[in-house]
Image (cartoon, grey):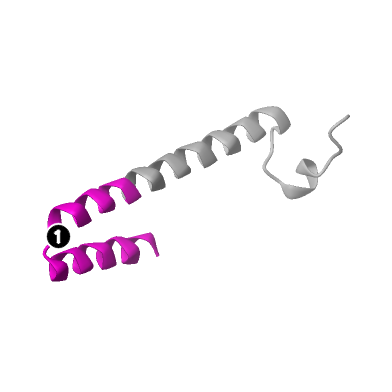
Amino acid sequence: MAKGVTLAIISAGYSNGRIVLSQVLTITVIVVEVIFVAVALGIIMLIYRKKQSLHLTKLEKPRGE
């Protein structure tokens, strides 16, 4: 879906004559997407280190255990 959005931004910029602006916006979208994936992976790794599993039943224990 994100690739479709970047393609739409580039196409709109090309049709309006603002190709540089559309390229900058596309790069920004890609950077935000990469940051999102990196943070999500960090959270998953932290959960795995703490619980030694990513199985949902082991993750649903109360906070005060």
Residue at image position (21%, 62%) is 10
Q: Is residue 3 left or right of residue 55?
A: left
Q: Is residue 23 found inside the magenta-colored segment of the image?
A: yes
Residue located 88% across and 30% down the image: 64
Q: Is residue 46 left or right of residue 36?
A: right
The stretch of residues the image draws in magenta is 1-29
Q: Which of 61 and 15 is in front in this view?
A: 15
Q: Position of residue 42 (x, y in %)?
A: 53, 34
Which percent across, then down, holds residue 47? 66, 34
* Residue 33: % across, % down: 40, 48
Could you tell whether 15 is left or right of 49 in the image? Answer: left
**21 or 47, nearer to the observer:** 21
- Residue depicted at x 33% and y 66%: 4
* Residue at x 14%, y 53% (from the top left corner): 20
Residue furthest out toward the left:
17
Three-letter amino acid code of the residue under disc 1:
Arg
Residue 12 lies in magenta, yes or no? yes
Magenta stretch prevailing secondary structure: helix
Quadrant of image for the N terminus: bottom left
Q: In the picture provided, is 31 more to the left or to the right than 47?
A: left
As helix, strand or loop, the secondary structure at mark 1 comes to loop
Eyeballing the image, is 56 above or below 64?
A: below
Q: Residues within 10 Å of mark 1 (few under 14, many from 20)?
A: few
Quadrant showing the C terminus: top right
Find disc 1 in the rendering and name its residue. Answer: 18
Does residue 61 lie above or below 2 as drawn? above
Question: Image quarter for residue 48?
Answer: top right
Q: Which of the two residues, 54 or 17, is positioned nearer the viewer here? A: 17
